[in-house]
Amino acid sequence: MRKDLEDAGFTSIHRNLFSRVIGGRESIGRNIKRIEAALPECCAARVFTMTERQYADIQMINDEKSEQELLVDARRQLVF
């Protein structure tokens, strides 16, 4: 599953936590289908979306934003 998600443009934040910046609400369903297709039957996934305003309120402590995070200006972040 990890390889499938990375091939689909997701970034590994932690061992089992991936994120992806997507371009608006229309793309959410398509990305959820990608996750469902890659998910083995024995596993579960949680999907969390946030608006650009919510994302802007995240406080970075002792870290720098990644290239992907810098792209978030008017887009959404998909995290699971």
Image (cartoon, helix red, strand yellow):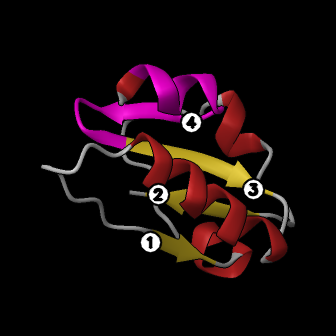
Secondary element type, mark 1: strand
Secondary element type, mark 2: strand
Residue 66 relative to residue 76: left or right = left
Kindly identify the residue that appears in the image at 26 percent across and 43 percent down: 40
Secondary element type, mark 4: loop
Q: Mark 1 or mark 3: which comes first in sequence?
A: 3
Indicate the amino acid at tag 4: Phe
The number of numbered discs placed on residues in the rendered structure image is: 4
> What's the magenta region?
3-17
Q: Mark 4 or mark 3: which comes first in sequence?
A: 4
Vertical comparison of 29 with 60: above or below: below
- Residue 29 placed where, x, y %? 67, 71
Kindly identify the residue that appears in the image at 64 percent across and 32 percent down: 8
Residue 22 — which label? 3
Q: Say which residue label 1 marks.
A: 48
Distance from Cα at disc 2 to Cα at disc 1: 5 Å
Distance from Cα at disc 4 to Cα at disc 3: 10 Å
Residue 10 — which label? 4
Q: Mark 4 or mark 2: which comes first in sequence?
A: 4
Residue 28 relative to residue 40: left or right = right
